[in-house]
Amino acid sequence: MTHRTRRPHRHRRRSGGRLAAALGATALLLAACDVPGGSERLSADCAVVVDGSGSGADSDDGFRAKEKLTAALPRFLADKKCKYLSYAPITSASVASSCQVPRIDIDPDADTRAEREGLWTQTRFLAGAGAEKMLDCARKRRPGSDVLGGLDRVAKVPRDGGGTFHVLVISDFDQADPDFKLSKYQLDTAARRNQAVDALVTGRGLPELPDTTVYRVGFAMRGGRTTPERVDHMAQFWQQVLEKEVKVDVDDGYGA
């Protein structure tokens, strides 16, 4: 009798244990589904280009490149759902610059956790550190601002994601390299802008950036010394260079 009375008891314990385990697994699954980003994966290819010239100084004489980078990059990475982030410098000779920061995978497949937000917080922090490292390197090189060369440099990075290539450019876009200085050109008429565009693009290869949007931060903000008229003329000049010659879309939504 004792033996028979214990069997049901053991059976109930085993059944109760299996039920508790099943309920626990279900709760974990539901929790993972309820967490924002629990089933989401990032996919976009992105890049950041940073201007190391004197016009980006962190003072009243510059457009405060580091400050703008710190403010814009986290929002950019989140908004565009960047999986990869590549880096490029703007110096007097951007293409030939020795500044190098490896591309970062913000949502690595090797990490199998279901909830990704914590992972992204860590990797986006590392992505920002990489951008600051690139900026610090660019600032130590020869002064100058080869913006078009910076875009050419980023055009050569790998692209493994799908859709639009998102490129954040932290620069005042005051092109100044050994062969071309935008400040020397009058841009107040279409004819003069055409002359300046021809002088910039003739003799140098244009960046190949299909399916690309360039997000400008710091455009024409050099220490408040650029007049509203000059800003308007620069905007028309760069619209011609970027949209008609390089054939990228331009977005100033992160420039505030």
Image: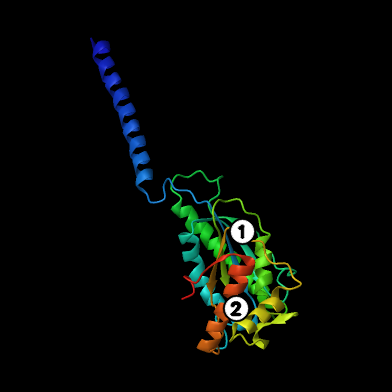
| N-term-proximal mark, 2 vs 1 | 1
The correct choice, above or below, for 136 with respect to 208 in the image is: below
User: What colour scheme was applied to this rendering of the protein?
Assistant: rainbow
**Residue farthest to the top, as pictured:** 1
Q: Position of residue 96 (x, y in %)?
A: 75, 69
Q: Secondary structure at mark 1?
A: loop
Q: Position of residue 234 (x, y in %)?
A: 57, 81
What is the tally of numbered marks visible in this picture? 2
The residue shown at (57%, 88%) is 61
Viewer-closest of 215 and 21: 215
Viewer-closest of 12 and 41: 41
The residue shown at (69%, 67%) is 206
Amino acid residing under circle 1: Pro
The correct choice, above or below, for 123 with respect to 176 in the image is: above
Which quadrant of the figure has residue 197? Answer: bottom right
Amino acid residing under circle 2: Phe
Write down the residue under mark 1: 210
Labelled disc at residue 237: 2
The correct choice, above or below, for 177 with respect to 73 in the image is: below
| Residue 135 visible, this orientation | yes
* Contact, mark 2 vs mark 1 (Cβ under 8 Å): no
Q: Secondary structure at mark 2?
A: helix
The residue shown at (72%, 68%) is 95
- How many neighbours does mark 1 have within 10 angstroms: few (below 14), some (14-19), or many (20 or more)? few
- How many neighbours does mark 2 have within 10 angstroms: few (below 14), some (14-19), or many (20 or more)? many
Q: Position of residue 79 (x, y in %)?
A: 46, 61
Q: Position of residue 52 (x, y in %)?
A: 64, 76
